[in-house]
Image (cartoon, rainbow, N blue to C red):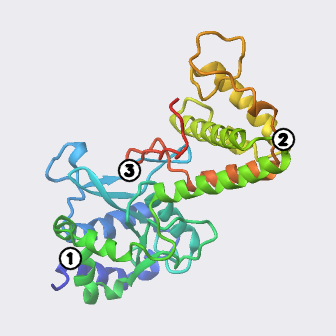
Amino acid sequence: MAAPETVLKLCETFDAHKEHYKSSNYNETELRREFLDPLFKALGWDVDNEQGYADAYKDVIHEDAIKMGGYTKAPDYCFRIGGARKFFVEAKIPSTDIRGDTAPAYQLRRYGWSAKLPLSILSDFEELAVYDTRIRPNKGDKSAKARTLYYTYDQYAEKWDEIAAIFSREAVLKGSFDKYAETAKGKRGTGAVDETFLAEIERWRDALARNLALRNDKLAVRDLNYAVQKIIDRIIFLRICEDRGTEDYGRLQSLQNGNRTYVRLMQLFLQADDRYNSGLFHFDQGEKGRPSTPDTLTPDLAVDDAVLKDIFKNMCACFPSAGSASTTPPTSPCMTRW
């Protein structure tokens, strides 16, 4: 399939005035209106909702809202079928080095990772990069990490078949997008958000169990297992509450600062006991009418700061946002009913 005339014209225009487009005088809004909107229209997407669909069924949502780490972020474009997200596009001004700059790639990958999307696109029109957003993003990653395709504007005409075969609306409807995404699945470093999070929980369990056994030498195996389960379940519960706005966001993260980390964590647990009528937090021996017996074990345990700080440090990077419309927090294998 030959590239549409509109795409050829876009490439000619960009080439003719490249110096202006790459200057600081040219902004992202202009780029989106003059180049990216028409590019994706050429791929069959109703970018301007000319069909007049209700918000729930629009092909394209501009600056879609997703929840990441307690904050609402807005990818520039969200492309959907029947209201279901398929991929994001993040736009950058043409002076951006899409190929080499790490920050835009990390930003896009965090968006896609948080929304559990398989692929997403980063583009300033001059360059277009496709990323596998199932691969967990890390701030130190190079820009090429998880990048599956890369084109420059002077390749659009030649490579149009490849681009349209994955990202055109027709290709998505026919399953070609999903088939391409499947070819990248299972490569080293890939993993669904839930799978990665559960694996991280197991790492926390192991580290915490080893430390509790080391610092509390009279702890029986049964009590050790109970303590590990309760501490991790409570942390996960409070982290979900932070995302849902029922707890102040960032309190767990703040425990990375200073010492006596477990003592300060226990203060959060005790406050939660006052707020939530749940067996997960039950420390008051004088309180009547609770179905569970009070926990007299975990408040007096010794836990090294480093073990807990490692949990809090890695929690933000791997924890799916509970407030995201498309993400539900996974349940810990050991989590009790609240």
Residue at the location (52% across, 76% down)? 145
Q: Amino acid at mark 2?
A: Lys
Q: Which mark is residue 64?
A: 3
Q: Secondary structure at mark 3?
A: loop
When the figure is inspected, residue 298 is found, relative to residue 321, above or below; the finding is above
Q: Which marked residue is nearer to the observer: mark 1 or mark 2?
A: 2
Residue at the location (79% across, 49% down)? 213
Q: Earlier in the sequence, mark 1 or mark 3?
A: 1
Give the image location of residue 277, x and y in percent: 57, 19
Q: Mark 2 to mark 3: distance in Å?
A: 53 Å
Q: Secondary structure at mark 2?
A: loop
Residue at the location (22% across, 66% down)? 172
Q: Which marked residue is nearer to the observer: mark 1 or mark 3?
A: 3
Drawn side of residue 268 relative to residue 53, left or right: right
Q: Residues within 10 Å of mark 2 (few under 14, many from 20)?
A: few
Q: Mark 1 to mark 3: distance in Å?
A: 26 Å
